[in-house]
Image (cartoon, grey):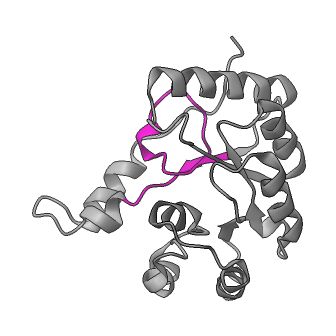
C-alpha cells in the first residue's frame, strides 16, 4: 500500500498475509510533488503494529547516496523498515545495506528505467554477484515495481507491483485470480556467482 494512495490500507490488513507500506516517493517524484516524511512516519506507525507489516524507508529518487543515508538515519522504527538501493548507486552501498539490514529494497532509476532491458539485466547480475560473494544465504532483497521479475533468474525474496490494484476491474480479471496467478510464479532461492 502506497502512502501516495493509502485508502486501502485497512482492507489490506484485513485480508493480507503481510503488507508492505510503500513510502510513496516514486509517485511524488513522478508528479513533481514534495514528500512529507513526518506524515509518512505517523501513518506507518499504526500499521507497523501488525507483526507481518513492514515499510519502505524514505528515499529520494535520482539524488545519489548521501541523501539516502541521511533519510535512513532518521527512520524511527528500526528493522520494521527496509532501506532502498537505487540501481545507479555504487553496488558497494547495496552490499553494505544487506550487511546491516534484514530487508533491502532495490528500485530502478532513470538510467535503468526499463525493467529487464539488457542494461538493467547486466546491472542486476553484477549486484547479485556481489551480494552472493558476501552472503552464503542471500539476504531478503525486495524489488520495487518488480513483478515482471517473478520467475526470472534473480533470487528476489519479494517483488511488488500495482497490477492488481490498477487492473482488477477489467472483465477478464478478478483480484483473487490475479493474486493466484502472481503467487504461482516464484523467484529462485540461490544465485551462482558468474
What count of labels does the image hold? Answer: 0
Name the spot of residue 70 as percent of width and height, x first.
86, 61
- Residue at image position (66%, 28%) is 190
- Residue at image position (44%, 85%) is 7
- Residue at image position (78%, 25%) is 130
Q: Image quadrant of residue 155?
A: top right
Q: Image quadrant of residue 93?
A: top right
Q: Image quadrant of residue 45?
A: bottom right
- Residue at image position (66%, 36%) is 88
Name the spot of residue 82 as percent of width and height, x first.
74, 59
Q: Is residue 187 above or below residue 168?
A: above
Taking the magenta stretch, the answer to whether it contains residue 84 is no
Q: Is residue 78 left or right of residue 190?
A: right
User: Which quadrant, please, contains the C terminus?
Assistant: top right
Q: Is residue 110 above or below residue 21?
A: above
Q: Is residue 30 left or right of residue 75?
A: left
Q: Is residue 6 above or below residue 163?
A: below
Name the spot of residue 5 as percent of width and height, x first.
45, 77
Q: Is residue 33 above or below residue 13?
A: above
Magenta span: 141-162
Q: Main secondary structure of the magenta part?
A: loop
Amino acid at each position: 500500500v502506497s502512502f501516495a494512495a493509502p485508502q486501502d490500507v485497512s482492507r489490506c490488513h484485513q485480508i493480507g498475509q503481510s503488507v508492505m507500506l510503500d513510502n510513496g516517493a516514486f509517485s511524488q517524484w513522478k508528479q513533481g510533488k514534495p514528500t512529507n516524511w513526518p506524515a509518512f512516519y505517523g501513518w506507518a506507525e499504526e500499521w507497523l503494529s501488525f507483526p507481518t507489516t513492514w515499510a519502505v524507508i524514505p528515499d529520494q529518487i535520482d539524488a545519489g547516496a548521501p541523501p539516502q543515508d541521511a533519510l535512513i538515519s532518521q527512520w524511527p522504527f528500526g528493522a520494521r523498515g527496509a532501506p532502498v538501493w537505487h540501481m545507479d548507486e555504487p553496488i558497494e552501498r547495496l552490499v553494505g545495506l544487506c550487511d546491516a539490514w534484514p530487508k533491502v529494497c532495490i528500485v530502478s532509476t532513470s538510467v535503468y528505467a526499463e525493467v529487464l532491458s539488457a542494461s538493467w539485466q547486466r546491472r542486476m547480475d553484477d549486484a547479485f554477484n556481489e551480494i552472493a560473494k558476501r552472503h552464503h544465504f542471500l539476504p531478503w532483497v525486495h524489488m520495487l515495481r518488480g513483478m515482471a521479475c517473478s520467475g526470472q533468474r534473480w533470487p528476489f525474496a519479494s517483488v511488488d507491483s500495482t497490477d492488481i490494484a490498477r487492473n482488477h476491474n477489467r472483465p477478464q480479471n478478478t483480484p483473487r485470480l490475479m493474486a493466484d496467478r502472481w503467487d504461482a510464479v516464484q523467484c529462485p532461492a540461490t544465485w551462482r556467482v558468474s
